[in-house]
Image (cartoon, rainbow, N blue to C red):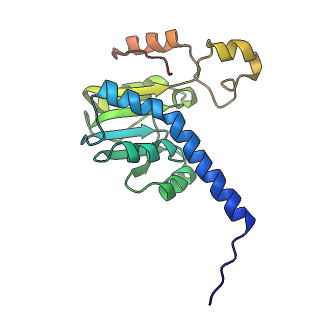
Amino acid sequence: MEMRIISDNFWVNNLKSNLTDIKLSFYYRMWKTRIYKHGGISKYSKIKILDVGCGYGYFLKCLERWLLNAEIYGIDIDEQRLTLASQRLSRTKLIRQDAHTLLFSDKYFDVVTALQLLEHLEKPEEFLMEANRILKNNGLLIIATPNPSGIAARLLKEKWHGYNSEHISLKNPQNWRLLLQDLSIYWKTEQPG
């Protein structure tokens, strides 16, 4: 009879991982609603969706559960994050790629998401033009970025999480709208919640 010894760290790490998945799944649920509502998409739709700046793949894991027939892609510039993401995902195609030049055909995707990405880009306008290029006509671009004129930023001032050295393109919603307008990209603003 073979005995397996499982250390306390195994249980702690497993619990942390499961709690992280549950917490993030709850947080990401609002994006599921927006994808279904604004994209005219259901659980069984045959679509192509790209998550730009996918990191460790938490959102992609949710997409795999929510969109059973979708062709799902994730890109990130960080190889280590992609390696870890590949361990949690079963059918997503992961690609190491910069967000400024998306190596996909024109009008390829039904949905492109960029959650907490734009503030990290030196030239977010290049990404927005590329996203517009690879989106099908009437495709859905979902972006989320910290709001430096929001209530949290105003209350917390310099302690607000959005003010950090990695956020090189922080803009308030009005400035993002102006940028989209300058790029001739149609948008619809909807506040999370």
Seen at 45% across and 10% down, the residue is 178
Q: Left of 100 or right of it: where is 140?
A: left
> Residue 161, how many percent across, how many down?
69, 26
Seen at 33% across and 26% down, the residue is 37
The quarter of the picture where residue 46 lies is top left
Task: Pick the residue in front: 138 or 1.
Answer: 1
> Residue 57, how many percent across, how many down?
50, 47
Task: Pick the residue in front: 95 or 87.
Answer: 87
> Residue 35, how many percent across, how many down?
36, 30
Q: Is residue 23 visible?
A: yes
Task: Pick the residue in front: 10 or 72.
Answer: 10
Point out the residue furthest to the front here.
Answer: 1
Image quarter of the N terminus: bottom right
Seen at 65% across and 54% down, the residue is 15
Whether residue 154 is situated above or below residue 55 in the rendered picture: above
Whether residue 115 is situated above or below residue 179 in the rendered picture: below
> Residue 70, how many percent across, how many down?
30, 45
The quarter of the picture where residue 62 lies is top left
Q: How many marks?
A: 0
The quarter of the picture where residue 163 lies is top right
Seen at 69% across and 12% down, the residue is 154
Whether residue 168 is situated above or below residue 59 in the rendered picture: above
Q: Is residue 132 visible?
A: no
Q: Left of 169 or right of it: where is 33?
A: left
